[in-house]
Image (cartoon, rainbow, N blue to C red):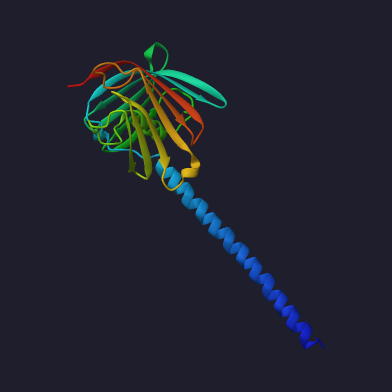
Amino acid sequence: MINATKMGACLTLGLWVSGCVWMQANETGIESQRQGRDAHVMEGAVEALLPVGALPNDLLMRQHITVQWADGAESFDSVLQKQGQTLLVLGLGPMNTVGFTLTLDEGGITFDNRSGREMPFQATRILADVQRVFYPWIENDSRCVACERREVRAGLEVRERIGPRYLEERSFRVVARPDRGEIVVRYEGWTEGSLVPSRAVLLNGWFGYELIIETTSVESID
């Protein structure tokens, strides 16, 4: 016959073990949910796009692009065109053949890869980088000379440093995940009356790559 005291002790131990297992499982579930929410927040920030028309000028730009990351680097020429409600990126190969076509318009994103190999970056992320560099994220204020300004858009904290005449630096940080670092864009080579600088360098602290954009020509589209 089992002693009642021993039975009570066994029952207590069993409940304690069961409670510990439940708590551990519950904590694991909560942590998994938190990681899922964090991933969703980061994905939304990474792919945050502004409306095409947020860039007021219709432009055609010829550019040389260099992408550098831990395991390598790649360079290519490109054409960037914003006209009306359409943003178009052409990646050029040898003899100016079109390697890929990337379009953002009212119908969404269209990507046509003709290069015959897999692209190292997702189409949405390419467009997001284009907008982070060239689009206005903070409303222009002529009184802001040699100043800094800040605004929150699409879950991103955007900071800009304005020099005596031109934008010098812009940074992006996820409001909900400041621990993930930031994206920093530095601008060089502004000239009198230019709509874009001749050189912009984007450092992506989220995914560890550097994007160098050298703009060789700019045309306004009437």
Residue 117 located left or right of residue 3: left
Give the x, y percent position of residue 212.
43, 22
Image quadrant where residue 8 sits: bottom right
Give the x, y percent position of residue 215.
35, 18
Image quadrant where residue 63 sits: top left
Tally the marks. Answer: 0
Give the x, y percent position of residue 124.
39, 35
Query: Is residue 140 positioned above or below 222 on the image?
Result: below
At a point 40% along the width and 44% down the height, the residue shown is 44
At a point 44% along the width and 25% down the height, the residue shown is 211
Q: Quadrant of the C terminus?
A: top left
Image quadrant where residue 90 sits: top left
Residue farthest to the left, as pictured: 222
At a point 49% along the width and 20% down the height, the residue shown is 74
Residue 82 located left or right of residue 72: left
Residue 55 located left or right of residue 133: left
Q: Could you say which is closer to the camera, residue 28 or residue 88?
A: 28
Residue 138 located left or right of residue 112: left
Residue farthest to the right, as pictured: 1
Q: Quadrant of the N terminus?
A: bottom right
